[in-house]
DNA sequence: CGGAAGTCGATAGACGGCTAATGTCTTCAG
DNA sequence: CTGAAGACATTAGCCGTCTATCGACTTCCG
């Protein structure tokens, strides 16, 4: 069992659980904060645009949007000029979550990296970026 | 958007996709290799034991085991002495995957970390371990 | 202008993951 | 020895994610 893959996997699972717990405090499910973030940055985006921004497939965004619309976080509306497009718009409830959710996220980042020196943190980010680059290249090559 | 969480999330997603592609070559779905690994190490374990080893809940193992039994990778059998227990046993097909799957896994690890010097790799592992430790502590404290 | 090709979102269905509820078998205390 | 408590696996149902398919709307070319 390769050690990097194993350790990364376990860390990933733990971070996921911690992020989930944090978001749950604001009534969100894991991942919904990312969709909201895309709309906080620019409201009225289409599912396809958001999917590309989050590096996720369109059906994933569609499903999440359906649940989040039910939860009153956003609304769906077809684009006036191009009826193929759908645009997602934040509700007041969706907008109101921005500050608390972003703060929660920053707090989590701080806490999990608190044990690293600034230099270690910098090296971690750079090494992780390299792994990400290599992995993306690997995926691209085996089309 | 905190940079470590963001980068880690993206790397995680890329690694997941790459691992999935690798396992698919052997007819496995992502994660099934981990369940198999638990049985390769010691055959005849129970769902609960495996769940603990993989740091996953029991229902997750039960579902995976059901699919993998259908796929002919393992069989279910109740323990003779304690009828509450179920033991999972590898089939020949499940055993035969060990070498190729472990090789695939090692190859992936090598390729994604190929761009790092031994020192960088060592520091990455140590930093990741620290993040994992801090995250686990965070989760434990908010019971 | 009208049909073919292209662009989107929505749906279907599979998988891994979780929590909560169910059911069955052991164990243990009275 | 019998009933309550405990230990397991399983089922149900939700969420995020993917691929494959469908359906509706635009666009563009002959």
Image (spheres, coloured by chain):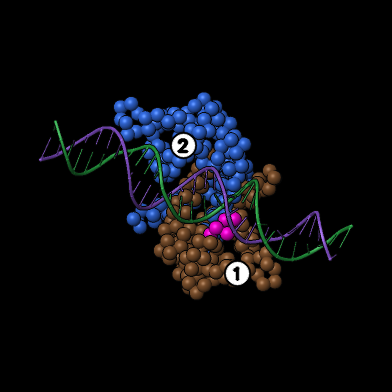
Chain colours: A blue, B brown, C green, D purple
Q: Image point 51% across, 41% down: which residue?
A: A31
Foreground pick, B91 / B108: B91
Asked if one can make out residue A92 in the rendered structure from this viewpoint, the answer is yes
Magenta stretch: includes residue B61: yes
Left or right placement of residue B78 versus residue A126 in this view = right
Please tell me whether residue A95 belongs to the stretch shown in magenta: no
Would you say B11 lies left or right of B129 here? Answer: left
Q: Tell me the CA gap for discs 1 and 2.
A: 42 Å
Camera-nearest residue between B81 and A26 = B81
Tell me the element at label 1.
Answer: strand
Seen at 58% across and 31% down, the residue is A100
* Quadrant of the rendering where the C terminus of chain A is positioned: bottom left
Looking at the image, the residue that sits furthest to the bottom is B92
* Residue A66: mark in rendering: 2
- Label tally: 2
- The residue to which callout 1 is attached is B77
The secondary structure making up most of the magenta span is helix
- Residue plotted at (43% across, 64% down): B27
Q: Position of residue A16 (x, y in %)?
A: 56, 47
Magenta-highlighted residues: B59-64
Which is more foreground, mark 1 or mark 2? Answer: 1
Nearest the camera: B46 or A1? B46
Q: Residue B52: x percent and y percent? A: 63, 59
Comparing A59 with B134, the one in front is A59
Q: Is residue A53 above or below residue B140?
A: above
């Amino acid at each position: 069992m390769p050690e990097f893959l194993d350790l990364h996997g376990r860390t990933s699972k733990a971070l996921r659980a911690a992020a989930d717990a944090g978001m749950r405090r604001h009534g969100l499910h894991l991942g919904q904060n990312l969709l909201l973030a895309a709309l906080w940055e620019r409201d009225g985006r289409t599912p396809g645009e958001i999917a590309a921004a989050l590096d996720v497939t369109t059906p994933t965004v569609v499903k999440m949007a359906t649940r989040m619309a039910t939860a009153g976080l956003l609304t769906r509306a077809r684009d006036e000029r191009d009826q193929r497009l759908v645009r997602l718009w934040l509700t007041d409830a969706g907008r109101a979550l921005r500050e608390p959710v972003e703060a929660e996220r920053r707090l989590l980042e701080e806490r999990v990296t608190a044990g690293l020196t600034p230099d270690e943190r910098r090296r971690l980010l750079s090494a992780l970026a390299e792994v990400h680059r290599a992995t993306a290249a690997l995926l691209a090559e085996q089309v």
